[in-house]
Image: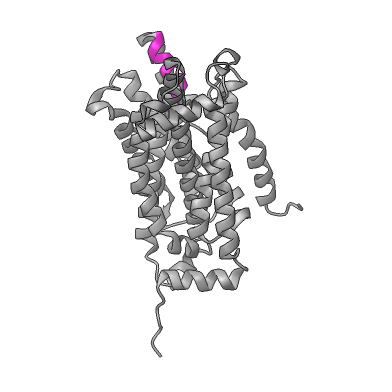
Amino acid sequence: MPTVQMAPQQAADRTLALAQPATGRKKAVVLLLLAFVLLLGVLILDLWLGEPMVEKVVTPSVVFQALMHHITGNPAWKPLVPTADNIVWQIRLPRAIGAVLVGALLALVGAAFQSLLMNPLADPYTVGVASGSGMGSVAVILLGGSAWLGGYAQTVAAFVCGLAAVWLVYRLSQVNGRTSPHTFLLAGTVVGAFFWSLIPLMVMLGSQAGENRQARILTALFGSLEAVGWRHALLLAVIGVVGTFALWRSAPELDLMAFGEETALHLGVDTHRFRLIVLSAGTLLTAAAVAVAGVIAFVGFVAPHAARRLVGPAHRRLLPCSALVGAIMLVASDMIARVWLHDVPVGVVTSLFGIPLYATLLRKSTPGRNT
């Protein structure tokens, strides 16, 4: 009797239903709406809170007036103090939107990589993508080429170097024409360490090239949203739409890959081609985030785990929930860094939150350990 092949979406739905009860659709929608409302609340706080002297000028009513003035174009809404309007619209809002987009993109990539590689510890940083993208971005700063290619040189270099890192990882992890997820992560660690070893050399060269370049290189390494403007937000939005669409289309196959490559192959997924698509989309999104905000660790690791607890493993729900959680996490972290920690790099704050959770999951995933 011939074997009947199911479509990936049908196969994914049936496999998830057999494996574990999925979170109800209505419950998932309610949770997504609540996460969206929470994100709006954090955004409003981020636009309002600041240094005590500035808070006297930028009140909640002034924030509302500035937003309404620029959204509607009605001069009647224009704040009486021009400085307050400039602070809200030209400085804080693009930075907050940049935090939303960077957090969302890193979380999307983390959720996709964790399922693709069947490893809860996977994220853009453990597979070498971010280290390659970071090196490309730092190299452009060192060469003084930030204005090249119409100002998009850092993004292009980050994507090319990130793609080169993924290609090296992919080649190193192949055994007899097949790729093992465990070998892939080990290869990612090796390649990531190689690219990171080149960055201290660039920092030293940057100090010889001038204090300004060295400061920009250090900002890129620690991760910062201080210099994000409307142009950066637009770049993130455009690239984000392309990469997010590719990952969204891949959701049924990601559901199947989470149960193992053999299961996915049996149910009709071309795992080799699919893996290349997801890795390319993830590299594109990571490169955009690294080029704009530098290296911000643990958002792509923490957010998918929190989202999975909220809406379950089905990627049609997991991906948008991960994006919302990642956005909330990074906006809140940047607000903490800007308001209460004297504008330290936001990557420091995310690492402080992420490292304990990473250590906890590492202990749980260790074979033979009782939890």
Residue 303 coordinates in the image, percent (x, y): 56, 45
> In the image, 138: left or right of 335?
left
Residue 323 coordinates in the image, percent (x, y): 50, 46
Q: Choose between 180 and 104: the one closer to the eye.
A: 104
Q: How many marks?
A: 0
- Residue reaching furthest left? 149
- Residue reaching furthest right? 370
Residue 219 shown in magenta: yes
Residue 148 shown in magenta: no
- Residue reaching furthest front? 76
Q: Is residue 150 above or below residue 176?
A: above
Q: Residue at x 53, y 40 (%)?
A: 40
Q: Is residue 261 above or below residue 107?
A: below
Residue 200 seen by the camera: no
Residue 75 coordinates in the image, percent (x, y): 36, 26
Q: Main secondary structure of the magenta part?
A: helix
Asked which quadrant contains residue 148, the reply is: top left
Residue 125 coordinates in the image, percent (x, y): 49, 39
Q: Residue at x 42, y 27 (%)?
A: 77
Task: Please name the colour scheme applied to the rendered image.
Answer: one colour
Quadrant holding the N terminus:
bottom left
Q: Residue at x 48, y 50 (%)?
A: 113
| Residues shaded magenta | 211-220
Q: Is residue 97 above or below residue 221?
A: below
